[in-house]
Image (cartoon, rainbow, N blue to C red):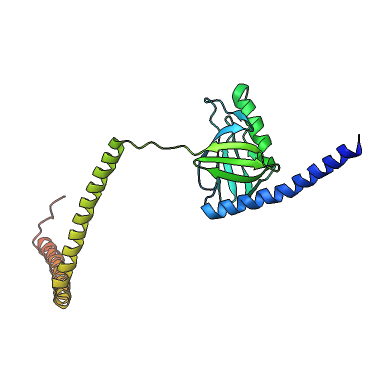
C-alpha cells in the first residue's frame, strides 16, 4: 500500500469521525426547532434499511415514556429506549413473543429486530419517521397512518355535537331549576315539620303498644271467665 493511499484513508476516517457529531448536532437543532417527537405515535414500518416491507406484513412501533412496543409483523415485542433531542437508542434485550415466522413476516422480523439496537438518532419529515444508525444511514423507516375524514364523517360529528349541546342545555336548565327550588325552600320550616312528624309517630307507636297490652289483658280475662263458668276454650 502506498503512502498516498494510507494518508487518504486516514483523512477519510478523520473526516467521518468529525462528521458524525456534526450530523447529530444538526439533527438536535432540527428537532428542537420543529418541536417534533417520535413518541406517542403509532408508527407503521415501511422499510428495513433500503428494503421495503411487503404490503401484507404489518409491523409497527410505539414509544412512550421510555417503553417501546409493537409488532415485528409476526410477533409482539417490548423493551426500553432512551431519547434525548435527536439521539435515540434501544436496549438490545427486547421481550419478544415466540410465534414461528416464515416467509416475508419472518424476514421482516429478523431485519427489524437486528436494526433496532443499531439506531442512534431519528428524524421526521412530514408523516415519515426515519431511525438512523451511527453512520447516518436509514436503519428503519416508518410512516404515521393518515386517517382520511370524509364529508359524511364531518356531518356525523356535527350532528353528534349538536345532540350533545342540546343535552348540555337541558342539563343546565335542570340544574338551574334545582337551584331555584333550593332557594325557595324554607329549611327551618321543613325541620320543624319533620320534628313534628317524628313526635306524632312516636305518640302513635306508644298508643299502639298500650292498645296491644290492653288486648292481651282482655284475652286473659276472657279465658278466666270461661274457666269459671265451665266453658272450654275453642280448639284452634
Q: Position of residue 144 (x, y in %)?
A: 49, 39
In depth, the one of 220 and 185 nearer the eye is: 185
Q: Is residue 85 shown to the viewer in this render?
A: no
- Numbered disc total: 0
Q: Residue furthest top?
A: 103
- Would residue 27 be found to the left or right of residue 179 on screen? right
In depth, the one of 186 and 221 nearer the eye is: 186
In depth, the one of 34 and 19 nearer the eye is: 19
Query: Which residue does the image show at 63% across and 51% down from the upper left?
Result: 26
Query: Which residue does the image show at 47% across and 37% down from the upper left?
Result: 145
Q: Position of residue 196 (x, y in %)?
A: 14, 75
Q: Residue furthest front?
A: 4
Q: Position of residue 79 (x, y in %)?
A: 63, 44
In depth, the one of 139 and 193 nearer the eye is: 139
Q: Is residue 201 shown to the viewer in this render?
A: yes
Q: Quadrant of the N terminus?
A: top right
- Would residue 222 be found to the left or right of residue 70 on screen? left
Q: Position of residue 201 (x, y in %)?
A: 15, 70
Please say if 185 is above or below 173. below
Query: Which residue does the image show at 63% across and 22% down from the upper left?
Result: 102
- Would residue 200 be found to the left or right of residue 49 on screen? left
Q: Residue furthest left?
A: 229
Asked which quadrant contains residue 205, the reply is: bottom left
Asked which quadrant contains residue 3, the reply is: top right
Amino acid at each position: 500500500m502506498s503512502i498516498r493511499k494510507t494518508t487518504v484513508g486516514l483523512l477519510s476516517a478523520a473526516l467521518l469521525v468529525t462528521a458524525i457529531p456534526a450530523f447529530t448536532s444538526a439533527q438536535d437543532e432540527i428537532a428542537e426547532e420543529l418541536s417534533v417527537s417520535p413518541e406517542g405515535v403509532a408508527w407503521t414500518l415501511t422499510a428495513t434499511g433500503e428494503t421495503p416491507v411487503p404490503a401484507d406484513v404489518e409491523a409497527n412501533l410505539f414509544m412512550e415514556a421510555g417503553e417501546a412496543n409493537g409488532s415485528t409483523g409476526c410477533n409482539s415485542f417490548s423493551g426500553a429506549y432512551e431519547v434525548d433531542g435527536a439521539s435515540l437508542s434501544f436496549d438490545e434485550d427486547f421481550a419478544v413473543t415466540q410465534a414461528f415466522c416464515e416467509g416475508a413476516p419472518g424476514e421482516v422480523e429478523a431485519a427489524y429486530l437486528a436494526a433496532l439496537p443499531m439506531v442512534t438518532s431519528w428524524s421526521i419529515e412530514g408523516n415519515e419517521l426515519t431511525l438512523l444508525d451511527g453512520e447516518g444511514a436509514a436503519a428503519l423507516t416508518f410512516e404515521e397512518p393518515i386517517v382520511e375524514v370524509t364529508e359524511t364523517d364531518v356531518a356525523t360529528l356535527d350532528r353528534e355535537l349538536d345532540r350533545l349541546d342540546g343535552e348540555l342545555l337541558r342539563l343546565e336548565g335542570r340544574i338551574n331549576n334545582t337551584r331555584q327550588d333550593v332557594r325557595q325552600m324554607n329549611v327551618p320550616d321543613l325541620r320543624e315539620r319533620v320534628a313534628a312528624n317524628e313526635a306524632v309517630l312516636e305518640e302513635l307507636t306508644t298508643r299502639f303498644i298500650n292498645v296491644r297490652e290492653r288486648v292481651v289483658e282482655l284475652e286473659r280475662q276472657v279465658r278466666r271467665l270461661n274457666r269459671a263458668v265451665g266453658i272450654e276454650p275453642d280448639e284452634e
